Amino acid sequence: MKVTLLALNIIAFSFLPLICIAQADFRPGYIIKDNGDSINGFVSYGSGKKNTERCFYKETKKSKYTSFTPEEVNGYGFLNDKQFESWGLPAELKSANPAADSKPRGKVFMKVLAKGPISLYRYGKYYLLHKNGLIILPYPENKLIETNQGSMLQNDHRYIDILNTFLEGSKLTANRTGYDESELTQLIKNYNRFKGYEPLPKNQKPSVKLHFAIFSGYMQSKMKMDWPDVVSFSPSSTIIGGIGLDISAPRTNDRLSLSLEGWYAKIFYQGYSERSVSGDLFRQDTFVDASFFKVPVGVRYNLLGQTNTPYIKLGLSLYFIGSPSIRILEEVEKAGNVIITEENFGEDFRIKNQRGIWFSVGYERNIFHNLNMFAEFRLEKNNGFIGSAVQSFSSSVDYTFLLGIKL
């Protein structure tokens, strides 16, 4: 356990520089100056509140960045991705939560969701409409009220009433529209189409993207067993191979993905123990030859976008073990230097499919078109394959270095 904690601490501290690097995620984009001119370059791909306060811009990947406030530029955006415009906050939004925002605000960057006869923007958890001016859609605050029939939930429909006012003259209604980015965006786009406005098609990111990988690696495993005696096995090493699949939703978050893998490994453990009982000395050598198919399932987070990025992964491992070969040599030394040797093949051992948790850090780099290469270090702790579903009599800690290619 101490070794595991030490390894995790080393990984955490060595990973701090990568977290700092992640702050500099510059992607192809543009800024819009006060005169309306658009200047292409590279823009920092922030998230959440950072996107509303400042824009960090570079002319080239290697040049120094320049910081712009919403007072200095009209907006910024990313190619085939998010777009932001500079707007002054409506008075009711400035005072919506003064305790959470003590400093006065002039203009902020708002995320553009739809453009046309009616435009839709987002700022934090709030949505705003623009037609002849900027109007906030009040955040719904449902309340419990007391009536003659007891407590009842009163739904807040203020934003729906405002939307229906804007939609007058069309066949559209907001009565079933939630206070949600996708639903509100679709409603406003439908209204704009009704008014004859059709936005220019753009090369959007795919809703789902699959990446396939093949890899090999070196694994060192340290196993312990406490049945019938406590046995510490010598560190065992083996070569593993496997395939992987990453599933992501780029339109929602192009850094987060679901990771599925399949490994095959064959490993040999050798352990020794001794004990004294009533003056007799028992020595035992245990040999275990095992093969297994492992299915690690986890989540992956890219620190710098989708390519040329450090990343972290965390997940669970499901094992499907074959029939392990177990051989035990026991030597009993009795008084008078009498030695008795016995051999058995683990008939009393119970075998189960173990489960594990794992954490890894890695780096992926593009080498040719859609072909990427990656290297990864992984640490895993599992409950061992000796024991039952109720009680485990073994455990192991695995250290693995992986090298592979990904499409």
Image (spheres, rainbow, N blue to C red):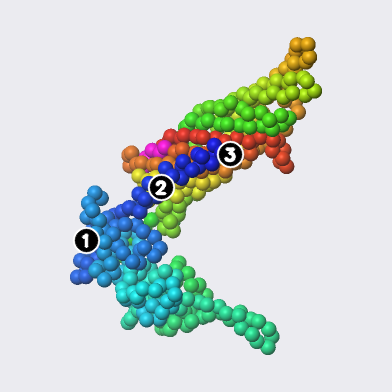
In the image, what residue type sits under mark 2?
Answer: Leu
Question: At 66% from the left edge and 34% from the top edge, which residue is drawn?
Answer: 394
Q: Describe the element under mark 3 as helix, strand or loop.
A: loop
Mark 3 or mark 1: whose residue is earlier in sequence: 3
Q: Which residue is mark 2?
A: 16
Residue on which disc 1 sits: 39
309 lies above or below 405: below
Residue at left offset 72%, top offset 38%: 388
For the residues labelled 3 and 1, the Cα–Cα distance comes to 55 Å
2 or 1: tag closer to the N-terminus: 2
* Mark 1 secondary-structure assignment: strand
Residue 354 left/right relative to 166 = right
- Residue 171 visible in the snapshot: no
Give the amino acid at mark 3: Met
Name the front one of labels 3 and 1: 3
Q: Is residue 126 magenta?
A: no
Give x and y (percent) for residue 209. 44, 50
Nearer-the-camera pick, 208 or 284: 284
Side of 17 relative to 237 (left or right): left
**Quarter of the image holding residue 46?**
bottom left
Which mark's residue is nearer the viewer, 2 or 1? 2
Q: Quadrant of the N terminus?
A: top right
* 230 is higher (above) or lower (below) than 22: above
Could one spot residue 86 in this view of the protein? yes
**In the image: residue 215, left or right of residue 352:** left
Question: How packed is label 3: few (under 14 Cα within 10 Å), some, or many (20 or more)?
Answer: few
- Under mark 1, the amino acid is Ile
The segment highlighted magenta reads 370-375
State which quadrant residue 44 falls in: bottom left
Specify the principal SS of the magenta part.
strand
Residue 154 got which mark? none
Is 30 drawn above or below residue 177 in the view shown?
A: above
